[in-house]
Amino acid sequence: MRSSLYTAAYLGLSSNSDDSFEEETEETIPPHCHITIRCTREIAGFNGLGEAVRRLDFRSSVRDRRRFHYICALLRLLVAHKGIANLSGSAQRQLLQMVEEVASHVNDSQQHLNILRGLALQLQHIVYQENQKCWGKPLGSTNLWQAHVETIKRIQNVANQIQIKEPGPEIRPKLHDLPEECIREIILRIADHRDLEASADAWTLMATLVSEQRIWRELTRFHFNQKQINTILDLNNFKLMGDVKDWKKVYHQLKRTYGLNDDYQFAEILSLCRYCCCLFWPSDGHPCIVDQSPDYKQRLEEAGGQLALSQPVPPAQFLKFFSL
């Protein structure tokens, strides 16, 4: 890119020509990453985590509120279960850079402080745990690990210095000033039963609203499909008794029976294109082989194939694509 601009300047092109050339060259390509799903004798491949993180632009995506929780969930899995010592040096640096970006974003937005502090504690435990040392020294480059320790200290300092302050008295309206109908609508948008139960301890009106059957009924329908709900209702003979009297009890029984799908907390999840084996963010899309090759698209249509076949990739499944 830089050499091309120097060549243009040498040829005496105008500044307007340079601008147009730069615009054409820097045409935004959506973040995406091709991966090898299966390795065979005919197809050999290796997926590098560091390269995937770079190509999918995870570091910048931290500040995208749609992707923030997905990336933080991925970081928690990497730090808690895989361990930083099992990653390559490049992936280690990128992981810590992403956590540092999370710290900067939390500091600027004054939100999700609990997520940042949890990551900082996990990192401290991983770096200093004994099974990552050999003869009293960390495995790998001493200088690299010293840089990791300094990065983690910076992250911890940011996490410890953040103080969430209540808006000043001049900021109106406050939560207590809102009518009951507005408070109920806020509660109906809480997707975690733990947050719902905790909000009941904050205020008498909140406790009254949380005890309403409608709140737990909507939470139940949000997490579970109608078939699962009907199964539990039949087991408890609720249909014979008429209306359900305790939706909170039904919710917790469904949770014990089927478990909760953690994907509900992600506004956007990475997707895998089944045609070109490409990971991409759905909101950005990706350059798919179906769009780039009209012949392939025509053959696919003649074979009766679907033209928008992709599947979501939760954080745990994302890590399975790599040898960690």
Image (cartoon, rainbow, N blue to C red):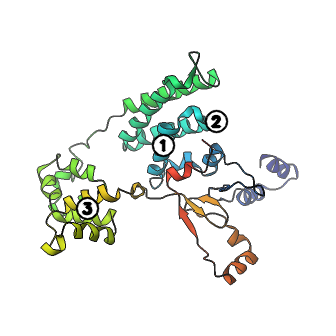
Q: Is residue 159 above or below residue 223?
A: above
Q: Residues within 10 Å of mark 3 (few under 14, many from 20)?
A: some
Q: Is residue 227 left or right of residue 35?
A: left
Mark 2 or mark 3: whose residue is earlier in sequence: 2
Mark 1 or mark 3: whose residue is earlier in sequence: 1
The answer to which image quadrant residue 284 occupies is bottom right
Of residues 115 and 229, which is closer to you in this image? 229
Of residues 22 and 107, which is closer to you in this image? 107
* x and y percentages locating residue 282 in the rendered image: 54, 63
Q: Assign a secondary structure to mark 3.
A: loop
Q: Assign a secondary structure to mark 2.
A: loop
Amino acid under label 1?
Leu
Q: Are marks 1 and 2 in contact (CB under 8 Å)?
A: no
The answer to which image quadrant residue 288 occupies is bottom right
Q: Are marks 2 and 3 in contact (CB under 8 Å)?
A: no
Mark 1 or mark 2: whose residue is earlier in sequence: 1
Q: Is residue 323 left or right of residue 120?
A: right
Mark 1 lies on residue: 77
Which mark identifies residue 324? none
